[in-house]
Amino acid sequence: MSEKIPFFSVVIPTYNRANRLSNTLDSVLNQSYQNFELILVDDGSTDQTAELIHTHYKDNVRYLPKKNEERSIARNYGFAHAKGEFVVFFDSDDYMHENHLQTLKEAILEHKDYHIFATKFQINTNGKLVRAPVCALAAGSHDYKSFLKGSFLNALFAIRRSLKVVPFPADFNLCEDWIFCVLNTYQNPLYLIDAITITVIDHDGRSMMQNQKLIEARVRATQKLITELELSNKEKQILQTHSYRFCAIHAYLDYNRKKSLYFAWKALSKGGLSFGNLILLVKVLIGKKWIKKIKK
């Protein structure tokens, strides 16, 4: 990690992940491109995070402990303390391939008109690697319209610090990355790089496992975006249809058939008789328990 003015500031918020943190921090520190600073925002951890940092990482990590206010505020706090030209957001349980920052730097130099960049990623579930849906997207420019159906990046992107950035919404701790992407790409499109340079580690502690909270957050986030942006009727339809589908799927995963049916019907009513909406409705009508029995 370079001592000169950093080109990148890698900002990682964390809360009680001392048992997973070393793999993430080591993956960042082992980057082939070394002109960066690593900022760890400890959002009020009560485990051994502080001891881990002071024992093993005090010379390589800017450790910023603070009271617990959840990850949106933690990310904004890290951004406010960053010194780099670009701020790279990362999660405290994921793995950064050694060429991640180098790949970002080369794209930034090549595409000087862009201010937001991201690479593609894969997902590790119990040792099984699967390409994330973002891998199917074309490389190049993606504005807010690409995000109306939902977030395909998580909070894994780089943004120019001098840009007039819309911060992560302090009243959201789920769907906050989606809101951030939509609001910030409304005026400044993101450049998606065609390279897999991150492995997302899937585990039971990830927020995407909190189905009921995710449903509530998605409904609120959808309304926030409709309120704050000037969207066409067609764009609102896309946004709402896919949010209803998202909620129906997570209610289905939670075995809440009544709620799943409610949102599936709203998706069908708003988006029409598409193949995806019909398949979703059929699955909901059958129910997850019966689907599992049929598959046996």
Image (cartoon, rainbow, N blue to C red):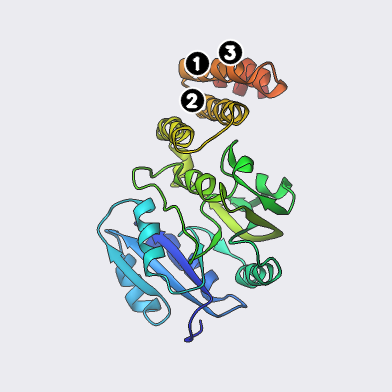
Residue 233: which quarter of the image?
A: top right
Q: Amino acid at mark 1?
A: Tyr
Nearest to the observer: residue 185 or residue 92: 185
Q: Say which element carries label 2.
A: helix
According to the picture, the residue beneath numbered tag 1 turns out to be 262
Q: At which x and y percent is residue 289?
A: 55, 20
Q: Amino acid at mark 2?
A: Ala
> Distance of mark 3 from mark 1, alpha carbons?
11 Å
Q: Residues within 10 Å of mark 2 (few under 14, many from 20)?
A: many
Q: At which x and y percent is residue 138?
A: 74, 49
According to the picture, the residue beneath numbered tag 2 turns out to be 251
Q: At which x and y percent is residue 260?
A: 51, 20
Q: Residue at x 38, y 43 (%)?
A: 172
- The reply to whether callout 1 and callout 2 are in contact (CB within 8 Å) is yes
Q: Is residue 168 above or below residue 100?
A: above
Of label 2 and label 3, which has the lower sequence position? 2
Residue 289 horizontal side relative to residue 165, left or right:
right
> Distance of mark 1 from mark 2, alpha carbons?
10 Å
Of label 3 and label 1, which has the lower sequence position? 1
Q: Say which element carries label 3.
A: helix
Q: Is residue 151 above or below residue 83?
A: above
> Distance of mark 2 from mark 3, alpha carbons?
12 Å
Q: Residues within 10 Å of mark 1 (few under 14, many from 20)?
A: some
Q: Residue at x 68, y 24 (%)?
A: 276
Residue 213 horizontal side relative to residue 240, left or right:
left
Nearest to the observer: residue 129 or residue 258: 258
Q: Amino acid at mark 3?
A: Leu
Residue found farthest to the bottom: 3
Question: Can residue 119 be seen?
Answer: yes
Q: Which mark is residue 285?
A: 3
